[in-house]
Amino acid sequence: MRRVRWIWFIALILAIGMTGCWDRVEIEDRGFVVGAGIDLADEEEAEEGQYILTYQFVIPGGLQAREGDSNNGSSSQKAYFNLSSAANTMFGATRKLSYQTSRSPYLQHLRMILISRKLSESGELASVLDVFLRDHEMRRATKIMVTEGEAREVLETNPKNEKLPVMFFESTSLNPTKSSSIFPPTNIGDVQAYILSKSSFALPIIRKHGNEVSVSGAALFDNAQRLKGFLNEEETSGLNILRGTAKDGVIEVRVNDEYIAYEIKGLRQTIQADVSDPEHIRFTIHLELEGNVGETQERLDLLSAHQLAELEEKTEQEVIRITNGTLTKLQQEFRVDVLDLGDELNRRHHALWQSIKDDWEQGERYFSRCDIEVKVRAKIRIVGSTLETK
């Protein structure tokens, strides 16, 4: 009897040990996906499915190639390859891709998802992202960007200073720290929150010009996840300033017939809402900027308090001009609240918000009707030095 119990005990231990690795996939059998692009199929391609999914796979040998390896030819090996498939669902497209490669797609290292403009305008954003949100391998920090053309074409870019196109896109998208015309990176977790709360939002734009790409501007989505339009560089700069996210960047201020470059080094934003008349809600956005004089084309006495005060005033006027241009686009043309003013009302005037939230962007369109005033205070902290300022 004791022997039988001992045999059963050993069998149980072996069974427990095997359950931990029965579905294990060896690392050399994984196809590491670092980027994805999603397009709408055209008429000819639609027979196979309405969506075209492109994955960018890493070739480990290409990543290891160095300049000194030219003798054995490894330096010319690409570090990636792209595969595309068409299907009516993202899950189906992924399964089709697994038939085209010896290594099954593995999404734990997915860094970026590119969505084409055409697909974004169709209102299918939530549908195509669903499979990525459900996948247990996915990271919530995966970035999402909108492409002006087809996403698969952008993934074919060959950057000069990066081995992987997606890594180049990601590093370029982090440049809001140097340029206020780039909308900050947005991850899939943020987008899911916008979708669940039925909020409007913005995403960065990536464009391809020949074999070069650039990241600038913002793509605006309404609360039904449908692309409403693009903001240009100046309008995006205004959006970042209004949102208080432009912690760095440059504002070119005209002084007489020349320009100075005001380098933003700090930005504080506060919002006040006046709801005394619910039919005519008023917002005041207070902006406090600190910055340096990065460049001046005009011969100015930058040590003069009077001259500095004049430069600060002109900077304030320029910021107001830029932000008012953005507000006109948001309120009158696209009619989307990507400034989160509705959230401000929800936090501070909850009862009022509950009564008007369904008419904020649709119906009565309270967002488009509200008055928004921008008040700016700009300070110059460092003027730098030059050979001649007088």
Image (spheres, rainbow, N blue to C red):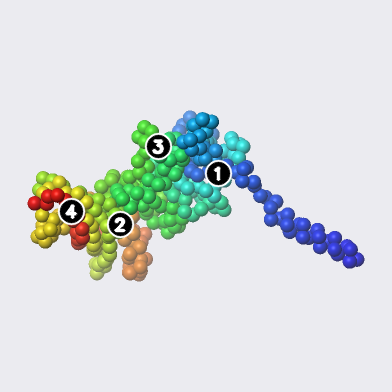
Label 4–label 1 contact, CB within 8 A: no
Amino acid type at circle 1 is: Phe
Give the CA distance from mark 1 to mark 3.
22 Å
Q: Can residue 93 be seen in the rendering of this structure?
A: no
Label 3–label 2 contact, CB within 8 A: no
Amino acid type at circle 2 is: Lys
Mark 4 or mark 2: whose residue is earlier in sequence:
2
**Which residue does the image show at 13% across and 46% down from the upper left?**
258
Label 1–label 2 contact, CB within 8 A: no
Residue 32 got which mark? 1
Q: Position of residue 176 (x, y in %)?
A: 33, 51
The reply, left or right, for residue 69 in relation to residue 219 is right
Mark 4 or mark 1: whose residue is earlier in sequence:
1
Give the CA distance from mark 3 to mark 4.
35 Å
Asked where in the image residue 153 lies, by quadrant, the reply is: top left
Of 164 and 133, which appears nearest the observer?
164
Provide the residue designation for mark 3.
160
Provide the residue designation for mark 2.
247
- SS under mark 4: loop
